[in-house]
Image (spheres, rainbow, N blue to C red):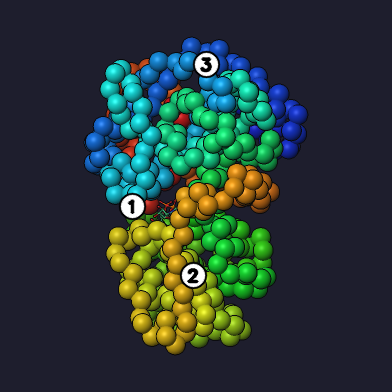
Amino acid sequence: MAPLLSLLHQAATRLARPHTLRAVRLCAARLSSSAPALNRAVVFSENGNPTQVLSVKSYEPLPPPPPGALNVRFRLSPINPSDINIVQGVYPAKPTRVTISGKELSVGGNEGLAEVVEVGDGVQGFEVGDWVISGKQQAGTWSTTRTLRADDTIKLPAQGLSEVNAATIAVNPATAFCMLHEFLDLKEGDWVLQNGDRLVGQAVIQIAARKGIKTINFVRTRHVIANDIDNLIASLTSLGANHVFTYESLEDRTLGKNIKQWTAGNPIRLMLNCVGGPTTLAMTRYLGENAHLVSYGAMSKQPLALPTSAFIFKNLQAHGHWQSRWYKEHSRQDREDLMDVLTALQLKEPEHEILDLSDEDNDGLATQKLRHALDRMERPYGRKILLRL
Ligand SMILES: NC(=O)c1ccc[n+]([C@@H]2O[C@H](COP(=O)([O-])OP(=O)(O)OC[C@H]3O[C@@H](n4cnc5c(N)ncnc54)[C@H](OP(=O)(O)O)[C@@H]3O)[C@@H](O)[C@H]2O)c1
């Protein structure tokens, strides 16, 4: 978006002026659709290490959309851990296939904010300039443009979302919200244990805090930057976390006593886990009777072994949550409602880096830039990357 339009857009978003916002978006969409289009996609022809197999390829402008479809231009598309797993070939979902210069390739990306640039015949409820996300999983969002079926497209609320929040709303905040609401009817004052401190974990903290639900969070000790752990604790606390500990504290015998004091002896009945392995097992010690352990990730790549006694004597219930399954099993209306609820929560933008490849005219140089960024992201404590193609 041109700088002036971008400023106007930010101002309209902050001031929540839907008409101004729509006008700015329309204007920007027209400018971007009339600009000489360099369409790019991040593709791979075989599974493997993303820093070796992913490349950036230009493709021809899209033809007008067929009836019932929309042409969209992606504005920002995140690289999530599951996207990396798809490239590696270790995730149970298939990427979108595209043909570029006569070669069939897989295009990455499941999530991203797009803007409607052309509306096909017979489509109702969408206008040029609308902000949308794909309701279908693995839509190949690491592309400049795509044609989407209108039936598979979800319109985002016309106000209240920044570009970054809109681009990252459908996976992580949605997962956090569903896990906090689908397994138990938590009430104000209830407690939740969790071990993720990034996108999902931070969304859990914020959504829980808005409802007066309290969180006890376990994180890794950070060695990379001095005092980084203090910064992390301060930042999670500012989002609404009640207590933040490193995994080493799980060995501290006084922790159980403290937890009992904070919870006034009320049982903790929900734990959210994206790590697995021994630290997750140690955390389950603090769950009360009839608790639900919900696993949604396995970042440590270690199995989760649970004591049989917890199932027998404490009636522990262990579940998995997969947001893709939630989307498959729910109606379009449910998804739109979820987006409305998440927008209204006004979550803080996740910490991120925007990798802008749109001004790089050479595919080879754009590929190099992408691979360097992936390498940075894969290092411990790397930041979330959002692609602008
Ligand atoms: N099931 C679903 O529907 C669903 C939806 C969204 C996300 N997920 C999954 O949830 C996980 C987190 O997603 P995210 O977007 O929040 O990812 P992220 O931003 O990359 O965060 C990853 C989290 O895992 C921690 N972590 C990474 N490696 C670890 C290790 N070896 N031991 C302990 N902790 C480790 C990180 O801790 P540090 O901050 O210390 O690095 C961070 O808290 C991923 O596995 C993702 O695939 C699942």
Does residue 86 show up?
yes
Q: CA distance from mark 3 to mark 2?
A: 48 Å
Q: For residue 380, which numbered disc appears in the image?
A: 1
In what quadrant of the picture does the N terminus appear? top right
Instruction: Classify mark 1 as within 8 Å of ligand 1 or not, answering yes or no.
Output: yes
**Residue 218 higher or lower than 91, as above or below:** below
Q: CA distance from mark 1 to mark 3?
A: 44 Å
The foreground one among 138 and 192 is 138
Q: Nearer the viewer, mark 1 or mark 3?
A: 3
The foreground one among 220 and 90 is 90
Q: Earlier in the sequence, mark 3 or mark 2?
A: 3
Q: CA distance from mark 1 to mark 2?
A: 24 Å
**Residue 36 higher or lower than 117, as above or below:** above
- Residue 337 is left or right of residue 298, and the answer is right
Residue 173, given in percent of the width and then of the height, sits at 55, 51
* Residue assigned mark 3: 64
The foreground one among 191 and 269 is 269
* Residue assigned mark 2: 271
Q: Nearer the viewer, mark 1 or mark 2?
A: 2
**Which amino acid does the dot numbered 2 rest on?**
Met
Residue 303, given in percent of the width and then of the height, sits at 30, 67
Q: Residue at x 57, y 63 (%)?
A: 182
Quarter of the rendering containing residue 279? bottom left
Quarter of the rendering containing residue 7? top right
Q: Secondary structure at mark 2?
A: strand
Neighbours of disc 1 within 10 Å: few (<14), some (14-19), many (20+) = few
Quarter of the rendering containing residue 30? top right
Extreme residue in the bottom direction: 313
